[in-house]
Amino acid sequence: TTQFVVSDVVNPVITGTIDTTEIFNTVCTFADAGDTARTVADLLALPNHGLTISDNCTAQEALIVEHSETTTGTCQKIITRTYTIKDLCDNFATVEHVIVITDNEAPTFTKPADITLFKDNNCNANVTIAATGDVTDEHDNCTATLEATYSDRVVNGCAGVDTIYRTWSLEDACQNQAPSQVQIIAVKDTTRPYFTIIPKDTIIDCDGIGNVDDLNSWLANVSAEDRCDLNVVITNDYS
């Protein structure tokens, strides 16, 4: 009696490739990659370039699909799923599916309202965010904790008003930036200047002897100060 042993040692045949899947502006977790393929039919349903899977002995629907995956990256998360297709004799072949999750969506926020402040008697004003307002509605699709920042440009204006242009900015962990917003803070000086020397009433003889000098000396014997302005201008209505 002659016995023949027929063994299947031929691996399944895979041709073509699975397309890279790109996902944008989600909640940016690896879970966004979706479910894995469970069957050959699932694999063939993925976007691909000429993907075929076959075996010399095992029917396509009987082929076993297993997978493993690796993950890398933070702002651009890359998942590489390696699918192993086995026939009933444990011959196998592999194919990869790469999934790229990208965050390119800018965060959002609302600047505090414009505000007017008043200087105190020492010519100071509290211009910290405790007094002028802070951003409270930072939001991003991927970064959970965000804090808006600001920079100030101060313009010393006329009529006792200084203006602070406070530019607010917000950036997420992937360097996506929200459009900057400018808050205008007006700081007013409403404290009047005051005289430190006031001329006393006087009588100047109009006899033509040194009268003009005496008069000018009397007019000049006055001084004033201001808590915010070092250049106080004194005028009079003498004519």
Image (cartoon, rainbow, N blue to C red):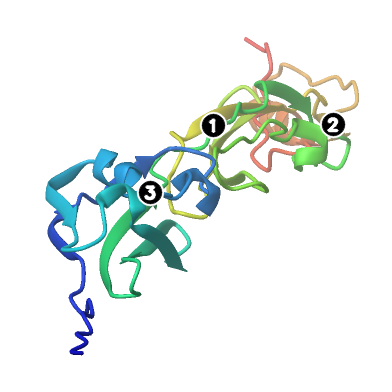
Residue 26 locus on image (x, y percent): 48, 38
At horizontal 15% and vertical 50% (from top left) the residue drawn is: 51
Task: Tell me the element at label 2.
Answer: strand
Q: Which mark is residue 43?
A: none
Q: Amino acid at mark 3?
A: Thr
User: Neighbour class for label 3 at 10 Å: few (<14), some, many (≥20)?
Assistant: some
The residue carrying mark 3 is 39
Residue 55 makes an appearance in the image = yes
Q: Is residue 138 left or right of residue 52?
A: right
At horizontal 46% and vertical 37% (from top left) the residue drawn is: 178
The residue carrying mark 1 is 108
Q: Amino acid at mark 1?
A: Thr
Q: Quadrant of residue 224?
A: top right
Residue 86 locus on image (x, y percent): 33, 67
Rounded to the nearest angstrom, the CA distance separating label 3 from label 1 is: 42 Å
Residue 125 or 206: which is nearer the viewer? 125
Q: Where is 215 relative to 227, above or below?
A: above
At horizontal 69% and vertical 17% (from top left) the residue drawn is: 236
The residue carrying mark 2 is 195
